[in-house]
Amino acid sequence: GAGVSQSPSNKVTEKGKDVELRCDPISGHTALYWYRQSLGQGLEFLIYFQGNSAPDKSGLPSDRFSAERTGGSVSTLTIQRTQQEDSAVYLCASSLGGTWSGPAYEQYFGPGTRLTVT
Amino acid sequence: EDQVTQSPEALRLQEGESSSLNCSYTVSGLRGLFWYRQDPGKGPEFLFTLYSAGEEKEKERLKATLTKKESFLHITAPKPEDSATYLCAVQATGATNKLIFGTGTLLAVQP
């Protein structure tokens, strides 16, 4: 079946501009996550959505970052007034979620959006 | 603070030369330990989840094991197509399901 999809695959923007990154999770997955992978760094958690619950925003690095999830499916990560240190690959993942055990926690990743801020 | 450390950072093997990758972790309460494979320019690909010490899982030439402090990813008779970065992550018990990743081991298998 279809996996997690992200768009665009690459984005080049000028410093100070706003960008929007999109994620389509696997159908039926109620949990959605955003991570960031910088050169030479491990994956860094940004934000987590689970159903209609309030999102866990504890990983967002500054108030320039925000995310929303509409209709429990598609999510958009917005970065305002981009800075050069925002350059990274932004990865989206989804999982079955809920209060089940085992496979419900397995996260499946999309191909990522490579953001370059010039 | 929850933390994951992977070693070695890079590993070069000859085709057929078996070896192991290490993932050491500290976490307040472990819900699961995850192994992923990442090819250049792609997102991580899920391999295994381990939930309790003593658990083992296998897939083709890969076998993952778990103790209370670390996990090993054993690669038996590797082939060039096993070349990739292998990522380890832990998920702590609690309200959030975020994964805490190590920085990965870059594996190169030469023919």
Image (cartoon, coloured by chain):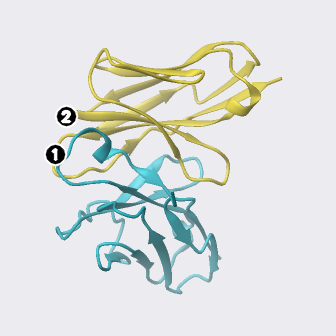
Q: Is residue B98 above or below residue A34?
A: above
- Single out the residue that lies furthest toward the right: B111
Q: Is residue B58 above or below residue B46?
A: above
Q: Residue visible at 49% across and 75% down?
A: A21
Q: Report if residue A109 is visible in the image.
A: yes
Label 1 packing within 10 angstroms: few (<14), some (14-19), many (20+): few
- Which residue is rendered at x = 19% and y = 40% of the image? B93
In the rendered image, the residue lying farthest to the bottom is: A17
Q: Which amino acid type corresponds to the residue marked 1 in the rendered image?
A: Gly
Which chain is depicted cyan?
A
Instruction: Establish if A114 lies above or below B23.
Output: below
Residue B75 sits in which quadrant?
top right
In the picture of the structure, the residue carrying the numbered disc 2 is B28
Q: Is residue A36 above or below residue B14?
A: below
Q: Residue at x 65, y 45 (%)?
A: B39
The residue nearer to you, when weighing B111 against A1, is A1
Q: Position of residue A110 (x, y in %)?
A: 52, 59
Q: Nearer the viewer, residue B10 or A84?
A: B10
- Are the residues at dot 2 and dot 1 in contact (C-beta closer than 8 Å)? yes
The Cα–Cα distance between marks 2 and 1, rounded to whole angstroms, is 10 Å
Report which colour depicts chain B: yellow
Secondary structure found at label 1: loop
> Which of these two is toward me, A15 or A55?
A55
Q: Residues within 10 Å of mark 2 (few under 14, many from 20)?
A: few
Report x, y in % for residue A116.
Answer: 62, 71
Residue wearing tag 1: B94
Residue B66 screen position, x and y as percent: 36, 20
